[in-house]
Amino acid sequence: MARGVLPESIFCGVSPAIFAAGNAGEFDEDLAVLLADVHVSGDEDRSGTKGNRPHLHSRTWLRKRVAGILKMRPLPRNVIIFGDLAYIVGRVIDYKQSYPELKLLTDAGIRLTIGMGNHDHHSSFFEVWPEYVKRTLVPGQVVCTVEFPHADLVMIDSLNETAKPGEWNPVPGGFSKVMEEWVVENLPKWRRPFFVGAHHGFWELSYGAKKTKLCKLLCKCPNFRGYIHGHEHFWNTGVVDWHVKDTRPFMTLPSSGLWGDIGYVTFRVGPDKAVANLVEEDFFQPAPCEPEKRNPYWDYRIAEMQGRSCTFPI
C-alpha cells in the first residue's frame, strides 16, 4: 500500500475484538507507548468525497495504532495519551467513538492513562471515562501518576478550559487555580525520580502572580528528570531551561494520526536512564492524499526522522 493512503475500508467488516486475540501474557513493566493528538471524531462522513476527511483518517490511524500495540511481545505495561483525544471541541460523541478501540488495550491488561489537551473538555471526558473522577489527584482536573519500577510520570492538566463543550477552548495552554496550586505544592516534594507530562509545552505554562514560567520551578525540583508533551504534532527535543546547569531534556511527541509527524514513541524507563524512540510512520499536511499528489518534502521528512531518540538520565 502506498505511503499516505490508509483507507478506512481495510477495517470494514473486521471486528475490533480480533486485534485483542492472544494478548494474554507477559508485560514489560519498564515499557510504555506514548501517543498524542489522537483527534478522533464521532461524526460519520457525510461529504460523499474521498478527499480531506481528517475526522476519518485519524480514526483509522487509532485503529492501526491499537492493533500494533496489541501485537507487541511482551506487551507494554502502559499506554499514555498526552491530550487531544477528542477531535476539535471535546464532544461526548468523540470520546464514545474512540472508547471501543482504547478499551481493547485495557481489556488486554495494559494500563491506559489519558491527559487533557485544548481540544478536550472535562465534563464530556468524565461522562465517557468516569473512572477518572476518582483517579485524578486534583478534583475537576485530570492529573494522574504513572508508576514505573524506577520512576514516575506525572500527567498534569494544561487545558485552559474557558468554553462550553462543543465550543473551542483557547489553543494555548494554561493552569486553573487549583492546578497551579497543586503543581507548586507537590512537584518540589516528589519523592521519586519523575517526569512531567502535559499536552502543552512548558513555555506556555506559568504560575503565581508574576506568571513565573514553569521551567523555573521544574529545574528546582530535586527529582525532576524531564518533560514530555504533545500539541505541536512535530517530533522535537531540547532542554527545559538553557540558563541553568541543572536543566533536563524535553521531548515533543508526534501526532497519532491527524497531521504532521504521524507515529508514536516507545518509552523505556531503566534504573539509570529512560530512552524514548520515535516510530515515524508518515508525514502529511493538512491531510493524507494520493501518492502522486504528495509533497516531496513529506517523504524526506519521514526518512530524516527514522531512528530519532531522546535519553533522559535517571
Image (cartoon, rainbow, N blue to C red):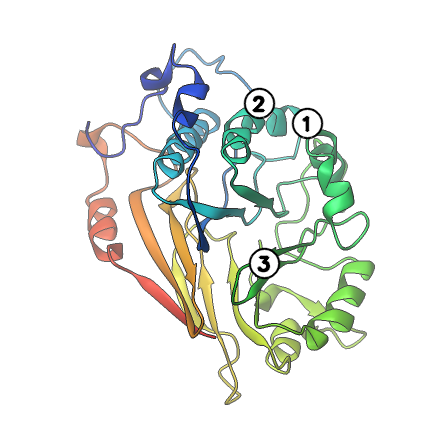
Disc 2 packing (10 Å; few <14; some 14–19; many ≥20): some
Where residue 127 sits: x, y (%)?
Answer: 74, 30
The Cα–Cα distance between marks 1 and 2, rounded to whole angstroms, is: 8 Å
- The residue beneath circle 2 is 42
What kind of residue is marked 3?
Glu
Q: Secondary structure at mark 3?
A: strand
Tags 1 and 2 touching, CB below 8 Å: yes
Where residue 137 sits: x, y (%)?
Answer: 76, 55
- In the rendered image of this protein, does residue 253 appear above or below residue 112? below
Tags 3 and 1 touching, CB below 8 Å: no
Where residue 92 sits: x, y (%)?
Answer: 68, 27
Looking at the image, tell me whether mark 1 or mark 2 is earlier in sequence order: 2
- The residue beneath circle 1 is 92
Disc 3 packing (10 Å; few <14; some 14–19; many ≥20): some
Does 208 sit left or right of 34 as displayed? Answer: right
Does 197 sit left or right of 32 as displayed? Answer: right
Circle number at residue 147: 3
Q: Nearer the viewer, mark 2 or mark 3?
A: 3
Q: Quadrant of the N terminus?
A: top left
